[in-house]
Image (spheres, coloured by chain):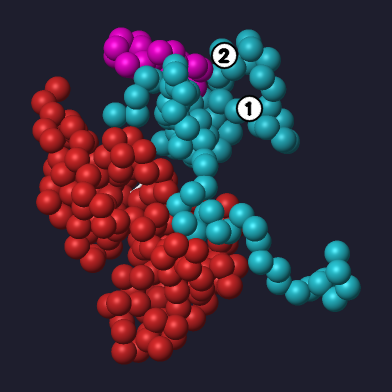
């Protein structure tokens, strides 16, 4: 199987690993780098559990090959908190009970930050629900997730 | 439980690790000899199953074993609550019921 060395920046750190040409970014993160915070819920681009940021944009990491991300800047759920201080979106999820089992949470949080950034000036519930279409939660029923995102929007704008 | 806590939301201890990507789920462990199960689900709502041909799948080098309803019954694993079979055998009780799981060495 053909392999290449794939290098990128992950959470501010330069990383490099051999990867098969068919290796997905999510496999590269989880298996080559051992960063299991990014989850695989479906493998078919439906659930959003694998969402990470590539050069600041949320992308489902099961839909892109690791080698397509060579040289780019990746942020995962592990890279959001600043030491013990959670990112405002993580904090809002905690405050608003927006998680139960936590399996969807990494992808939810990464997508949610994208939603807030795309709608900096104004964000309403309808927009949140619409833009959250690509992320499934099998536990919470979404209500508190939507609440958390709206609360984080306030905090992040402040 | 301190007085007044009933009906009051409390912060959960486990949330911090779930929110920072530090949770440990089954898929996060890598043990020697680990295999993956892939479930084949029924494409129809209700049907009789005269036979499930797993020969092609079993010929794949990565497939360790495939299990059908009969294997499940023979192993006396039992049923789900309500008596539903874990893997359908002769008849498919409902949409999306599992027909057979195959264990494979990698999920690639
Ligand atoms: S694992 Fe990527 S969308 Fe579900
Ligand atoms: S918290 Fe369990 S799937 Fe969302």
Chain letter for the cyan colouring in the rendering:
B
- Neighbours of disc 1 within 10 Å: few (<14), some (14-19), many (20+): many
The numbered dot on residue B85 is 1
What stretch of residues is rendered in magenta?
B49-68
**In terms of image quadrants, where is residue A24?**
top left
Q: Are marks 1 and 2 in contact (CB under 8 Å)?
A: no
The numbered dot on residue A99 is none
Element marked by disc 2: helix
Element marked by disc 1: loop
**Chain A tint in image:** red
Instruction: Name which residue lies at 44% across and 13% down.
Output: B65
Q: Is residue B67 left or right of residue A16?
A: right
Instruction: Name which residue lies at 51% across and 17% down.
Output: B68
Q: Is residue B15 left or right of residue A66?
A: right
Who is closer to the viewer here, B66 or B90?
A: B66
For residue A48, say whether it is visible.
no
State how far apart marks 1 and 2 are (Cα): 10 Å
For residue B75, say whether it is visible.
yes
Label 2 sits on residue: B70
| Position in image of residue A131 (x %, y %) | 35, 71
- Please tell me whether residue A113 is drawn above or below residue A73 in the rendered image: below
* Residue farthest toward the right in the current orientation of the protein: B3
């Amino acid at each position: 199987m053909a392999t290449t060395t794939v290098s990128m920046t992950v959470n501010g750190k330069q990383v490099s690993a051999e990867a098969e040409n068919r290796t997905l970014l999510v496999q590269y993160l989880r298996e080559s780098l051992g960063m299991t915070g990014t989850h695989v819920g479906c493998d078919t681009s439906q659930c959003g559990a694998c969402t990470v940021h590539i050069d600041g944009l949320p992308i489902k990491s099961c839909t892109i090959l690791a080698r397509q991300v060579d040289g780019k800047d990746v942020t995962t759920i592990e890279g959001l908190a600043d030491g013990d201080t959670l990112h405002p979106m993580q904090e809002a999820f905690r405050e608003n009970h927006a998680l139960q089992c936590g399996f969807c949470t990494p992808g939810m949080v990464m997508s949610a930050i994208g939603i807030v950034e795309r709608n900096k000036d104004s964000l309403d519930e309808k927009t949140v629900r619409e833009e959250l279409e690509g992320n499934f939660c099998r536990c919470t029923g979404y209500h508190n997730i939507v609440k958390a995102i709206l609360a984080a929007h306030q905090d992040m704008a402040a | 439980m301190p007085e007044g806590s009933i009906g009051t939301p409390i912060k959960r201890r486990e949330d911090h690790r779930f929110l920072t990507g530090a949770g440990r789920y089954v898929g996060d462990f890598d043990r020697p000899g680990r295999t993956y199960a892939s479930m084949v689900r029924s494409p129809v709502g209700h049907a009789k199953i005269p036979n499930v041909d797993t020969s092609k799948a079993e010929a794949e080098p990565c497939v360790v074993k495939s299990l059908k309803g009969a294997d499940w019954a023979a192993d006396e694993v039992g049923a789900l609550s309500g008596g539903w079979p874990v893997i359908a055998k002769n008849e498919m009780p409902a949409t999306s019921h599992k027909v057979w799981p195959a264990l494979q060495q990698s999920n690639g």
